[in-house]
Image: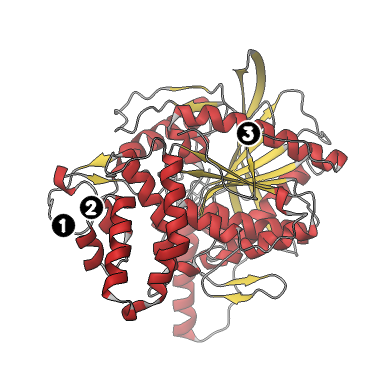
Amino acid sequence: MMRSGLAAGLLLATSSLAVAQDKSPRPSKTNAEAQRDAVEAGYANAPIEEREERSKGSVTVAGKRLPYTATAGTLTLRDLEGKPTASMFYTAYTLDGTKPGTKRPVTFFYNGGPGSPSFWLHMGSFAPVRLQTGNPEFIRPAPYDVAPNPYTLLDKTDMVFLDAIGAGYSRPLGDMKPSAFYGVDEDADAFAKAILRYATKFGRWNSPKFLFGESYGTLRSGALAYQLQDRGMALNGVVLFSSIMNYGYRQPGLDQVYINYLPSYAATAWYHNRLPNRPADVATAVQQAREFATGAYMSALAKGQDISAAERDQVAQRMSELTGLSADFIKRANLRVDLARFQKELLRDQRRVVGRFDSRYMGTDADAAGERPETDVSSDAISGAFIGSFQDYLTHRLGYATEMPYRLSARDAPGWTWNWKHDAPNRGGQQNNPNTAIDLAAAMRANPYLQVLSMNGWYDMATPFFGTENDLGHMMLEPSQRPNLRFAYYPGGHMIYLNPEALVTMKRDLSDWYDRAVAVARSGTPPVTPSVAASEGPVSGPN
């Protein structure tokens, strides 16, 4: 029977009160004692002993049948003395016949949040099964269509989907406080321990190893790539999917966030046909916005309130042509259009708003005159389907049964507070607003074979692609290292894989990239990969 860590916290609080009343010293409880108390109190808790539930499946990729073993289980994290500190839940897919010591690649997937479990990537992207999605519209209620995924990456790599501590079925153990895991560096440390444990337990130290993070998971990947390397695990590759690696530019009063968003506004206005001179493709609209953002727009914002009326009018007019908003609205916003205002304003004459995670989605608010959307329609449209299909799949197809609640976010746990401080390597210093592109750059300099692929959706308004280009473009890599960083763009939002057409292209690009990354490590001579652009200049995927 598995029990919750909440009981341990309540019992420890009661014990502390008793100590305060009688002033007599009492020894602190061990993990085992706290675990036992939780069991006796009737709470469901994560197991200290690692658990595994295995099942068999198969999927056909490019006409070839791939039999695999799915494992839903837990990894026990321990400190240097061997004390268990947390239980991390995972789901792994390994090609049948894979043995310890194999040279077959393995990839570790995770979502972001911070504090999100990995079921979004698990059910939507490259696992052997996938929730079927289509056009940017509300997914109908149950029954949901979960089917074998012909675009799975299983033909290239085994896959391990990891849930952050406090999310899903992952929990602190015994007397460990959530604060030991809820922070930039604390979270990266937990994932590093889990990956090291998985490699040791299943004999994967000699396998090519990859990280695949989405959203805040990309910030984690920057820190994690460096931490793993610092602990003796050199990676072959890192996939940055819908990235946010730098929270510094989001501080109030800074203008970089408006520069970062402008090309995303242009892409969204192009998609919804709101541009007065609409280019033939979204890539052209985006490139026009890029050039304006780093030229006249950046210059205008830098002048602050001292900008001349003539320059303000000129910049507002050009912004209007690029974003579909009126020049008057832009001037009233001081040339600085917040995301929520853009979402509300673009289609206001139609009484519609656009989504944040995916601006292709449209919705309606009760108040069409409001300043910001009442909800994110792109999140509402898919959440029920992803949550419901995963819960059914995990319990009834993978056979993982527990009385614990599956937390949709660690933010739902008592005492949620995230420590945003980050100790960057080398001369990075301590950051109050983390930028782990510094960590990733340090890992790439130390490991000249480390390949990085940045995958971006044109219509992602949560983590705008131009911000990613800016962050990765300031890693200050040497010319010889820059070909190891590559970019790709797709017609989708934050969860690009919702678009099945984009999924086809992404699978092709990832297959080529995995082949390249493995070949680089084996020969030291990277082959040409035409479908994914090198970092010398971002190029577009399909329109």
From where the camera sits, is residue 380 visible?
A: yes
Question: Mark number for residue 370?
Answer: 1
Q: CA distance from mark 3 to mark 1?
A: 43 Å
* Res 344 label: 2
**Residue 332 found in image quarter:** bottom left
Residue at x 49%, y 58% (from the top left corner)? 467
Tell which tag, 3 or 2, sits nearer the viewer.
Answer: 3
Q: Which residue occupies 15% across, 42% down?
A: 350
Label 1–label 2 contact, CB within 8 A = yes
Q: Position of residue 447 (x, y in %)?
A: 79, 55
Q: Which mark is residue 507?
A: none
Q: Residue lying at the far bottom in this picture: please name it.
A: 23
- At label 1, the amino acid type is Gly
Task: Look at the picture and state if 113 lies above or below 175.
Answer: above
- Find residue 435 and report its horizontal and vertical position in percent: 57, 66
At mark 3, the secondary structure is loop
Quick one: which residue is furthest to the top in this view?
63
Question: Mark 3 and mark 2: span between their CA atoms?
Answer: 36 Å
Disc 3: which residue: 531
Q: Earlier in the sequence, mark 3 or mark 1?
A: 1
In the picture, residue 139 is in which quadrant? top left
Q: Which residue of the protein is positioned furthest toward the front in this rendering? A: 310
Query: Helix, strand, or loop for circle 2?
Result: helix
In terms of image quadrants, where is residue 426?
bottom right
**Relative to 54, residue 168 above or below:** below
Task: Name the one closer to the observer, 200 or 472.
Answer: 472
Q: Which is more toward the observer, 373 or 128? A: 373
Q: Are marks 3 and 2 in contact (CB under 8 Å)?
A: no
